[in-house]
Image (cartoon, rainbow, N blue to C red):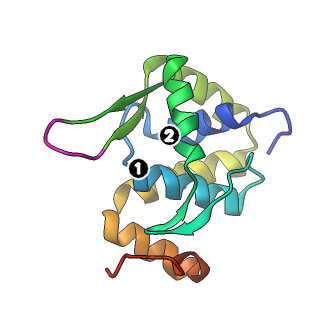
Amino acid sequence: MTPNVDKDDFVLAALSPAMTEGYTPVQVQKLFFLAQKQLDMPGYNFQPYDYGPYDKEVYSTLECLQEKGFVQIVSPAESRTRIYRLTDLGCERGAKVLNALPLHVQEYLSKLSSFVRSLNFSQLVSAVYKAYPEMKVNSVFRG
């Protein structure tokens, strides 16, 4: 990781492989948790919570990025679940940051983005618990 990448830019870079496709709350939490575990990412303070690693600051960061025009937060009428996606401006900025990162980081973030979006809620939470069992100590998940 390059030392001049701040948290906002890293978040945009991590979301950018999906372009304007959305992430659910569990997907963004696990995306940033796993990225932080594997990369020297500007940090969050993930704690074991109801469904594994969680930091409310992830949502604060996304809300700030929405105010800046980089992220769109959508609450579909048919669902209580919010969807977090990049705007066109966010895609542009995220791709620029991602492409400036070392190749191994670019590849990892692209694979990680696909991975978290390919699994349903239960599969994703279970996969994180399997890799990081310490994150299930406060879990209410029994999937």
Looking at the image, residue 33 lies above or below residue 81: below
Q: Quick check: 106 left or right of 139? A: right
In which quadrant is the C terminus drawn? bottom left
Secondary structure found at label 1: helix
Alpha carbon separation for disc pair 1 and 2: 17 Å
In which quadrant is the N terminus drawn? top right
Q: In the rendered structure, which segment of residues is drawn in magenta?
A: 77-81
Looking at the image, residue 32 lies above or below residue 13: below
- Callout 2: 10 Å neighbours few (<14), some, many (20+)? many
Quarter of the view holding residue 33: bottom right
Mainly helix, strand or loop, the magenta region?
A: loop
Q: Residue at x 52, y 34 (%)?
A: 62
Q: Which residue is mark 2?
A: 17
Looking at the image, residue 48 lies above or below residue 25: below
Spot occupied by residue 27 in the image (x, y as percentages of width and height): 43, 54
Q: Residue at x 35, y 63 (%)?
A: 119
Q: Within the magenta stretch, is there residue 107? A: no
Near-viewer residue (120 or 101):
120
